[in-house]
């Protein structure tokens, strides 16, 4: 079981994760911007335990999540991860469509 964090430490960790994901150069912001630029309409589901353990699911609202579409989205995601010198092993990525349930 992980050690208990004080409220201040929890706030620090939360801010670190939020900035890592959503800040101006946050990975989810960069990927989301790129996917929108390429014509995708997406919803993003995230479970982030730390910056080293992030689960992301992109739900495609306008397309069926065929195998080729899933591979394209994953390719875009991991290319941006690589461009930003991030560890691809920190991310668990799924791509689905509006027919999928909220599975991880």
Image (cartoon, rainbow, N blue to C red):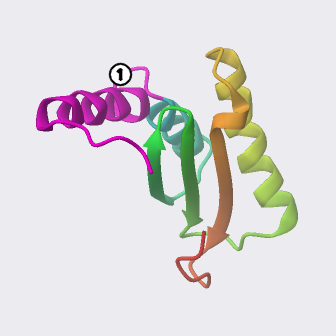
Q: Residue at x 35, y 22 (%)?
A: 24
User: Quick check: 75 left or right of 63?
Assistant: right
Prevailing secondary structure of the magenta residues:
helix
**Eyeballing the image, is 60 above or below 17?**
below
Q: Eyeballing the image, is 93 above or below 27?
A: below
Horizontal and vertical percent position of residue 61 = 53, 70
- Give the quarter of the figure containing the C terminus: bottom right
Region of the chain picked out in magenta, as a range = 1-26
Where, by quadrant of the figure, is residue 11 drawn?
Answer: top left
Q: Residue at x 35, y 41 (%)?
A: 3
Nearer-the-camera pick, 55 or 74: 55
Residue drawn 37% across and 33% down? 17
**Which residue carries the number 1 mark?**
24
Q: Residue furthest left?
A: 7
Give the percent coordinates (x, y) of residue 9.
21, 30
Q: Residue at x 61, y 16 (%)?
A: 84
Of 33 and 15, the residue lying toward us:
15
> For the residue labelled by badge 1, is the local secondary structure a helix, a strand or a loop?
loop
Is 20 in the magenta? yes
Q: Quadrant of residue 37?
A: top right
């Amino acid at each position: 079981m992980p050690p208990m964090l004080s409220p201040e430490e929890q706030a620090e960790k939360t801010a670190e994760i939020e900035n890592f994901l959503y800040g101006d150069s946050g990975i989810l912001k960069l990927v989301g911007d790129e996917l929108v630029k390429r014509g995708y309409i997406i919803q993003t589901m995230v479970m982030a335990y730390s910056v080293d353990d992030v689960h992301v699911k992109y739900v495609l609202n306008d397309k069926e999540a065929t195998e080729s579409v899933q591979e394209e989205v994953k390719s875009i995601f991991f290319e941006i991860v690589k461009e930003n010198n991030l560890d691809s092993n920190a991310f668990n990525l799924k791509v689905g469509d509006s027919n999928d349930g909220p599975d991880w």
